[in-house]
Image (cartoon, rainbow, N blue to C red):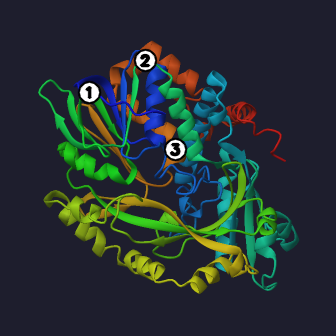
Amino acid sequence: MSTTDSAAPLTTDVVLIGAGIMSATLGLMLKELDPTLTITIFERLDVAAAESSDAWNNAGTGHSAFCELNYTPEKPDGTIDISKALKIAEQFEESKQFWAYLTEQYNVKEIQRFINHIPHMSFVWGNDNVDYLRKRHAALIQSALFEGMEYTEDRARLHDWMPLVMDGRDPQQPVAATRMDLGTDVNFGSLTRGMFNLLQEKPGVTFYFNHEVEKLRHKFDGTWGVKAQNRKTGEELKVRARFVFIGAGGGSLPLLEKSGIPEADGFGGFPVSGQWLKCTNPDVIARHEAKVYGKAAVGSPPMSVPHLDTRMIDGRKELLFGPYAGFSTKFLKTGSYLDLPASIQLNNLRPMIMAGLKNLPLTKYLIQQVRQSPQDRVAALREYMPEAQPQDWELAVAGQRVQVIKKDEKQGGVLEFGTEMVTASDGSIAALLGASPGASTAVSIMLSLIQKCFPQQSASPTWQAKFHEMIPSFGQSLATKPELVAEVRARTSAILGLVEEVR
């Protein structure tokens, strides 16, 4: 993809800020819905998907709630709340449907190679945790979305599922695991670049890489003035747009603040960085074939849920453990240490202070993580892989996330660990804040955005028909329709090449 430079003012229908999975999804959806739309994309780096969407910066799990225990909390009465798991599982099925549509429609290699089958497992130890996992399994399998999930406490079977996890483990330790063979590994970097390759081939789409958006101004006619600067030459570029989407990952909050819309008041951000232990021993990598997720430490953010993770990155099988959380005042991996202090304004000062005071355990946890020694990291790894050898692993820097802080009438401010869509009352601008499960649910998030910001078009027969073509289950609840779940999964698995791999 090449960068286009022009000193002349531009007029466009849509501006997308940030060349990540969210902008790629929205841009392609809009062009499928209305091929006449003109779209301008700004990215501050020289390539797409280099921040949170990149494979080394993203968990890549294909978050479907099969193995993520933080999506199924235990309530005070001992029952398991599976509502969030059902929602995320349904959203991931919508994502797979859209990806299957693109694969079938365009037959592009970059789209086809981004997803691979890999079993998703949850693993716990200790009597209380085993009891929790047993109850979780019993609750989840009531839904067609989790049909086929296996549960076992049998050590021989567990060793068959995950030999690295069981080798050298205390035989007296109570252990249990669940397994979902429908799990996937997703290279969101490859997917995003493939989607942008499709987008750039369409008429009316212009990319500006190495361009940082500096100003956003709402004009009297309802349009937006966007000013961006070429980071290499210093040249400024001005664009007028009818709709602006801010999908810049950790960089979205400062841009949202620049927009000046009242809906942005009170939002703040709390940055959390991450690191992986990356396996360098091919023999060890070959012995693991799963994504094994455990329980997060008390007070830790969801992005820190420990997992021993098989990944396919650039055609190679990799094995990662982590991520280890950390703290940086940067909002992007390639950002500035001034990002956090620069984001603090009068309208979000109180929410940020109150959220900070109410999340002191998180602050303590992050400080402990930052102070970890190499021996501490290996000790954490050995809880999941008892025979791990330090020489087989090296430290790698993962992505940067910015958790959402927003106003709350009762508490003053709350820290959110999901994603948050902020939209102007007239629907002319929207921004996506937050992190996990983000990329995996991009399709459903963008569907909601389109219907909110383009209400009249979305209600038209033409757009409604296209919604159903792109996502066959559009408008229906998969969680309550077992036959539809089976039909949708059979179709997407066949198109995405996942059928023969599922045992």
- Whole-angstrom CA distance, mark 3 to mark 1, is 26 Å
The crowding category of the residue bearing disc 3, from other C-alpha atoms within 10 Å (few below 14, some 14 to 19, many at least 20), is: many
User: What residue is drawn where x is 65% and y is 42%?
Assistant: 114
On the question of residue 153 being in view, the answer is: no
Q: Earlier in the sequence, mark 2 or mark 1?
A: 2
Seen in the picture, residue 404 relative to 298 is either above or below; the reply is above
On the question of residue 79 being in view, the answer is: yes
Seen in the picture, residue 267 relative to 116 is either above or below; the reply is below
- Whole-angstrom CA distance, mark 2 to mark 3, is 22 Å
Which image quarter: residue 328?
bottom left
Element type where label 3 sits in the image: helix
Disc nearest the viewer among 2 and 1: 1
Seen in the picture, residue 126 relative to 181 is either above or below; the reply is below
Which image quarter: residue 280?
bottom right
Q: Position of residue 209 (x, y in %)?
A: 39, 39
Disc nearest the viewer among 3 and 1: 1
Q: Earlier in the sequence, mark 3 or mark 1?
A: 1
Q: Position of residue 309 (x, y in %)?
A: 67, 62
Q: Which mark is residue 8?
A: none
The crowding category of the residue bearing disc 2, from other C-alpha atoms within 10 Å (few below 14, some 14 to 19, many at least 20), is: some
Residue type at mark 1? Ala
Residue picked out by circle 3 = 441
User: What residue is drawn where x is 37% and y is 54%?
Assistant: 250
- Name of the residue lying farthest toward the right: 156
Residue type at mark 2? Asp
Asked if the residue at tag 1 contacts the one at tag 3, i.e. Cβ–Cβ closer than 8 Å, the answer is no
Q: Earlier in the sequence, mark 2 or mark 3?
A: 2
Residue picked out by circle 1 = 241
Seen in the picture, residue 500 relative to 59 is either above or below; the reply is above
Q: Nearer the viewer, residue 420 or 308?
A: 308
Element type where label 1 sits in the image: strand
Residue picked out by circle 2 = 34
